[in-house]
């Protein structure tokens, strides 16, 4: 995996924080200096924290668990959609549906409703409806698709949340914190990093910076997914070898058992013969 370079982040504008008067003091460990009333983020810490987050997300992906990406701000939406789709992970880029995590069963019901509408269209039930009913259902389907289409395959709670602009997505962060779901986030100088498990200090308003960081993160996730596939293939091959090796072993055991059985039968026959002979001798003597 390619290393995240300082110059790339600098060129993308990842170092620009917010105005000094808007800062959150909790972000002071990640601030390098102040220039013209604007805080400058320490990009060496950005690189270190991004690598740390990428390593953790790689392990989550490798274990076969889902990571939910969240970004509803205009400049980040297309980037998050593209990157999340590239690693087949769920994402939310429209308004965050309140209770999406804390009331997950209800969200699943809404997703199921969308699937039922699709089923109606396929089996011809939709065609039997009136024009007005068709219009209502079509509008409902479009609304559900817009809000929940990107999480259609999320059948259980995600194992991690990746958030761009933790201040804007504070409801999502609170829900994840309540459920103990680890939160990874791009955190700007005006945000509170205390509720974020893996803080990536960077400019969350710069589309290029978000693209660069997410590209690195998703590359790590892809590596985790690839390693999972390789491990599965190796395990499958090992099982096949065990089965192939077991057949000759079973055959050898069967042969040994057969020999033992033949020996026992021969021994029993000899014993029976001896007993019979002694019986005959006894009769003669009498």
Image (cartoon, rainbow, N blue to C red):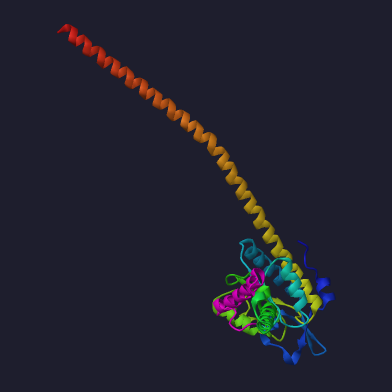
Residue 146: which quarter of the image?
A: bottom right
Q: Residue at x 25, y 15 (%)?
A: 276
Query: Which region is colored magenta?
Result: 96-125
Residue that extends furthest to the left in the rendered view of this protein: 286
Location of the N terminus by quadrant is bottom right
Q: Is residue 184 left or right of residue 180?
A: right
Q: Nearer the viewer, residue 127 or 198?
A: 127
Q: Position of residue 73 (x, y in %)?
A: 74, 83
Residue 136: which quarter of the image?
A: bottom right
Where 268 sits versus 128, above or below?
above
**Secondary structure mostly seen in the magenta stretch:** helix
Where 228 sits versus 155, above or below?
above
Q: Is residue 247 left or right of residue 83?
A: left
Q: Position of residue 130 (x, y in %)?
A: 66, 81
Q: How many numbered badges does the structure rendering display? A: 0
* Residue 63 lies in the magenta-colored region: no
Residue that extends furthest to the bottom in the rendered view of this protein: 21
Q: Nearer the viewer, residue 169 or 48?
A: 169
Q: Nearer the viewer, residue 100 or 173?
A: 100
Where 132 sits versus 223, above or below?
below
Q: Position of residue 262 (x, y in %)?
A: 40, 24
Where 266 sits versus 121, above or below?
above
Q: Residue at x 60, y 45 (%)?
A: 238
* Residue 102 lies in the magenta-colored region: yes
Q: Position of residue 254 (x, y in %)?
A: 46, 31
Residue 168: which quarter of the image?
A: bottom right
Location of the C terminus by quadrant is top left
């Amino acid at each position: 995996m390619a290393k995240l370079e300082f110059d790339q982040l600098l060129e993308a504008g990842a170092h620009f924080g917010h105005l000094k008067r808007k800062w959150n003091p909790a972000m002071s460990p990640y601030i390098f200096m102040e220039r013209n009333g604007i805080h400058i983020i320490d990009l060496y810490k950005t690189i270190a924290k991004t690598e740390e987050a990428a390593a953790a997300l790689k392990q989550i992906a490798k274990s076969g668990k889902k990571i939910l990406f969240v970004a509803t701000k205009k400049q980040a939406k297309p980037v998050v959609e593209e990157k999340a789709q590239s690693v087949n992970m769920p994402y939310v880029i429209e308004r965050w549906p309140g209770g999406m995590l804390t009331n997950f069963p209800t969200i699943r019901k809404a997703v199921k409703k969308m699937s039922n509408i699709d089923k109606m269209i396929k089996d011809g039930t939709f065609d039997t409806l009136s024009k007005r009913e068709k219009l209502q259902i079509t509008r409902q389907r479009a609304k559900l698709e817009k809000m929940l289409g990107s999480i259609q395959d999320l059948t259980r709670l995600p194992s991690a949340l990746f958030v761009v602009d933790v201040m804007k997505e504070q409801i999502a962060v609170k829900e994840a914190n309540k459920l103990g779901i680890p939160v990874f986030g791009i955190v700007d100088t005006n945000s509170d990093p205390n509720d974020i498990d893996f803080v990536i200090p960077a400019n969350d308003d710069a589309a290029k910076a978000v693209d660069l960081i997410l590209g690195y993160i998703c590359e790590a996730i892809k590596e985790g997914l690839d390693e999972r596939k390789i491990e599965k293939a190796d395990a499958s091959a090992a099982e096949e070898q065990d089965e192939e090796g077991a057949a000759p072993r079973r055959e050898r055991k069967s042969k040994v058992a057969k020999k033992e059985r033949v020996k026992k039968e021969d021994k029993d026959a000899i014993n029976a013969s001896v007993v019979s002979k002694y019986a005959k001798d006894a009769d003669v003597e009498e």
